[in-house]
Amino acid sequence: MPVPLSILDLASISEGSSARQAIADSMAAARLADRLGYRRLWFAEHHNTINLAASATSLLIGQAASVTERIRVGSGGVMLPNHAPLMVAEQYGTLANMHPDRIDLGLGRAPGTDMMTARALSRSSAEPQEFAQHIYDLQGWFGAEGTARSIPIQSAVSAGTEVPIWVLGSTVNGASIAGQLGLPFSLASHFAPEQIDDALQVYRDTFNPTAITAQISEPYAMVGINVLVADTDEEAEREFTTIEQMFLDIRTGQRRLIQPPVDPEQLADQRGGALSALRVKAVGSPQTATAQLREFADRTGADELITVTYAFDPAVRKRSLELLAENWL
């Protein structure tokens, strides 16, 4: 069987569009992904970013779960320092009661925003020990009694839901936390490719199936990759310049909505520098893109791949999802 494919969505807002339309397009993509057989659909949390509508992830997850039937829906992730852990337990417990056995909770330590906005959002600590303690309490709130393991606070709405918890990370630090806690690990290699091999090795080496927080008996790694599939290599490479422009804007501090594609040659001199963060990718015709995906899956030993596809035109993203599913799943 091929490595399962999942989707990370950020509800991107294109030039000339709106947050309302971006969310509607995300829900349409969710219904399509459900029909095509993708394993999961996760939403990432971002703040103070004008080109993304993925801020209130629990609301997006609830809506996506309500318009689909099979696909698992979750957070990729909840940036835990921005939230009170009890509130996360109550939100995701509610989702799990509304959509049984379909909700995932991916947790990250990064703020998903700039430091000024992070201070405005901050509700808990990002320190590794505190982060692990919050996971320990969340598991208690999701457990049979619905009670935190370190404090006598009960959450009736999350009790017994056993929502699966994932640790998200982009470095060996996040990998080590996931391994020591005995939890599945999602590696953000789609924008942080520098430590892929080291992070996966650390995760597997430190994995502790007997940890009190352990959910699985052996390591399970889901690895991120940028994907754009089109009818031809040339078309895919041109459409991929949309995300390349987005990353250049991040590097230069330019605040723009998602831009239409340009001639790839216009960005050629940036690919060895500012755009190197996007080098983990599968971009091309179905034959080209699936070959790149297989090579990456073999290199990493990934148990699952989570794909990230930005497109100025929602129809381009829809076509990419369809072509990939037809030639992989």
Image: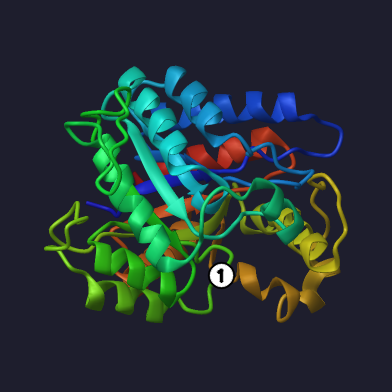
Please determine whether, in this image, residue 229 is positioned above or below residue 219. above
Q: Residue at x 81, y 30 (%)?
A: 17
Q: Residue at x 32, y 64 (%)?
A: 178
- Residue 19, horizontal then vertical, whole percent: 74, 30
Residue 324 appearing in the image = no
Direction from residue 45 to residue 76 in the image, left or right: left
Residue underneath mark 1: 192
Q: Amino acid at mark 1?
A: Ala
Q: Position of residue 117 (x, y in %)?
A: 73, 51
- 95 and 303: which is toward the camera: 95
Q: Is residue 8 visible?
A: yes
- Crowding around mark 1 (Cα neighbors within 10 Å: few <14, some 14 to 19, many 20+) is some
Q: To which quarter of the image does residue 279 belong?
A: bottom right
Q: Residue furthest front?
A: 152
- Residue at x 61%, y 40% (from the top left corner): 317
Q: Position of residue 288 (x, y in %)?
A: 50, 61
Exactly how many numbered labels are in the figure? 1
Q: Residue at x 64, y 39 (%)?
A: 55
Q: Nearer the viewer, residue 9 or 208?
A: 208
Horizontal and vertical percent for residue 85? 43, 43
Residue closer to the observer: 313 or 186: 186
Say what secondary structure mark 1 lies in.
loop
Colour basis: rainbow
